């Protein structure tokens, strides 16, 4: 009984230590981010976190939980998490989040868009994450993120005023922004749920701007 308790305690200590090690590694690699919100959008961006992982790996914790063969591989590259909340009075059908990345010298590195197709009811939130790319050559250390477009259930589309984004980024990062930097070079689809597909296929109409 005592031996079993010691083994369980030791195993718990190893798992806890492994989880702390993985967390510390990611935390140290987090980039600095700013969020730009417009109260008129009907949605508030609550989170944007980005971090760099320098190599693909399996964590000790995952191997112990899933086994060597089934343990997920934490892929190298830039990873991110985004979160937002519906503050409007109707369902959100889809939205696009734009992200501007600057390198260690405060120079332009990349602009990309994150697309979410999901029915989000008023007052509800959604958090999602993913991997940006395998490009390890660009040391992106500073990010600015904002909700650029929102499609509501009644077909109306809200669009962010880029003048607001430009002004706030320049103020918070103390850097001059070229307006062209705010236009994404590519769109990453993060989430598209079944309810979203059903609603968009059934309506079959163009959004109202």
Image (spheres, rainbow, N blue to C red):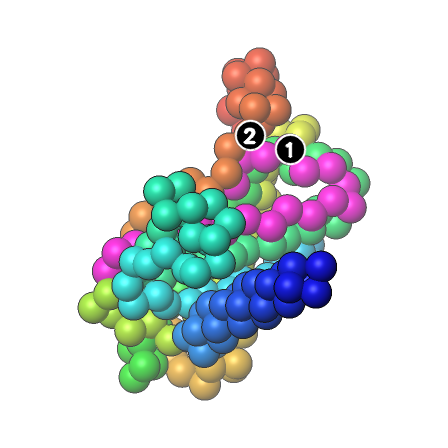
Please give the residue where the numbered disc 1 appears in the rendered image. Answer: 119
Name the side, left or right, on which 11 lies relative to 176.
right
Position of 205 relative to 177 (above/below): above
Q: Residue at x 40, y 64 (%)?
A: 100
State yes or no: residue 191 in magenta: no
Name the side, left or right, on which 44 lies relative to 179.
right
Q: Residue at x 37, y 48 (%)?
A: 68
Give the tally of numbered discs.
2
Q: Looking at the picture, tell me which residue is in the foreground, 91 or 4.
A: 4
Q: Residue at x 60, y 54 (%)?
A: 83
For mark 1, does the 10 Å Cα neighbourhood hold few (<14), some (14 to 19), or many (20 or more) residues? many
Residue 30: where, in percent of width, then height? Answer: 46, 73
Q: Residue at x 66, y 56 (%)?
A: 44
Please give the residue where the numbered disc 2 appears in the rendered image. Answer: 193
Label at residue 5: none
Identify the magenta region.
Answer: 111-135
Q: Nearer the viewer, mark 2 or mark 1?
A: 2
Q: Looking at the picture, tell me which residue is in the foreground, 201 or 132.
A: 132
Residue 186: where, in percent of width, then height? Answer: 32, 48
State yes or no: discs 2 and 1 in contact (Cβ < 8 Å).
yes
Name the side, left or right, on which 54 lies relative to 148.
left
Q: Looking at the picture, tell me which residue is in the foreground, 13 or 87.
A: 13
The N terminus, quarter of image = bottom right
Locate residue 99: give its quadrant.
Answer: bottom left
State yes or no: residue 120 in magenta: yes
Residue 123 visible in the picture:
yes
Residue 105: where, in percent of width, then height? Answer: 30, 84
CA gap between label 2 and label 1 equals 8 Å
The local secondary structure at tag 2 comes to: loop
């Amino acid at each position: 009984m005592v031996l079993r308790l010691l083994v369980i305690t030791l195993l718990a200590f190893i798992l806890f230590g492994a989880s702390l090690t993985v967390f510390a590694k990611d935390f140290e690699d987090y980039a600095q981010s700013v969020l730009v919100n417009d109260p008129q959008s009907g949605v508030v961006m609550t989170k944007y976190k980005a971090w760099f992982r320098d190599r693909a790996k399996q964590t000790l914790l995952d191997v112990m939980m899933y086994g060597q063969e089934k343990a997920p591989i934490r892929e190298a590259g830039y990873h991110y998490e985004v979160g937002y909340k519906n503050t409007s009075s109707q369902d959100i059908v889809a939205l696009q989040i734009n992200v501007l990345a600057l390198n260690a010298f405060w120079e332009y590195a990349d602009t990309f868009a994150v697309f979410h197709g999901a029915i989000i009811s008023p007052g509800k939130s959604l958090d999602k994450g993913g991997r940006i790319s395998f490009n390890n050559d660009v040391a992106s250390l500073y990010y600015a993120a904002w909700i650029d477009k929102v499609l509501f259930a009644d077909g109306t589309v809200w669009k962010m005023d880029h003048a607001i984004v430009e002004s706030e980024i320049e103020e918070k990062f103390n850097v001059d922004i070229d307006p062209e930097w705010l236009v994404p070079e590519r769109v990453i689809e993060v989430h598209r749920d079944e309810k979203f597909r059903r609603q968009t296929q059934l309506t079959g109409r163009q959004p109202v701007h």
